[in-house]
Image: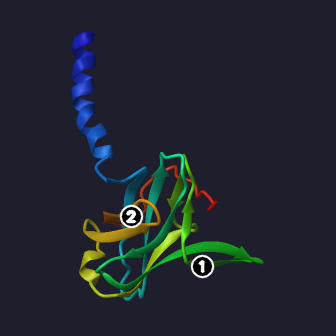
Amino acid sequence: MLKSSLLLAALLLPVCVAANADDYKAGDLLVSDPWSQELPPNAPTVAAYFVIHNTGATPDRLLSVETPVADKAELHEHVMQGDLMKMQHVTSVAVPAKGDLTFAPMAYHVMLLDLKDRSLLTDGKQFPLTLTFEKAGKVDVKVSVQKAPPMAGHEHKPAQ
């Protein structure tokens, strides 16, 4: 029994390590699982998503984003206006103390505008994205491009 338990643990270890391969830390913040959906042909824009975990007792604020694959990268959110869901630009997003902030479809997201390097926006590729926080400073992440959204149970957390 002990032998099979050890074998199972040894087999699962690479899976556990790989689960944290897409985490990026700055101060009390951890940016997890940055991803973007593959760019459809002739699409003028694409969005990037991730989760920000704040383990600290102090809130922070995401102030800006930038990437070499686009002339502009903006923080956006989806909001209901009457019966319509609309996307709008926001100047910054609060990251709650001891909480999470999820960037996901139909929630907060990074909108990449005026795309420059479309070759990096295909399935299996990665592109760099720099997030600038008020307190934690800059965090450089690699965004994984995928054909379909990852299956994750993340829920949108409103800004504080």
Q: Position of residue 57 (x, y in %)?
A: 54, 46
Horizontal side of residue 40 vs 58, given as left or right: left
Three-letter amino acid code of the residue under disc 1: Met
What residue is rendered at 41% in x and 88% in y? 44
Q: From the image, tell me which residue sits under label 2.
A: 137
Of label 2 and label 1, which has the lower sequence position? 1
Q: Is residue 91 above or below residue 5?
A: below
Secondary structure at badge 1 equals: strand
User: Mark 1 and mark 2 in contact (Cβ < 8 Å)?
Assistant: no
Q: Position of residue 69 (x, y in %)?
A: 30, 81
Secondary structure at badge 2 equals: strand
Viewer-side residue, 130 vs 10: 130
Q: CA distance from mark 2 to mark 1?
A: 27 Å
What residue is rendered at 60% in x and 79% in y? 87
Q: From the image, tell me which residue sits under label 1.
A: 87
Quadrant location, the N terminus = top left
What residue is rendered at 41% in x and 69% in y? 132
Viewer-side residue, 119 vs 22: 22
Q: Position of residue 98 (x, y in %)?
A: 54, 46
Q: Nearer the viewer, mark 2 or mark 1?
A: 2
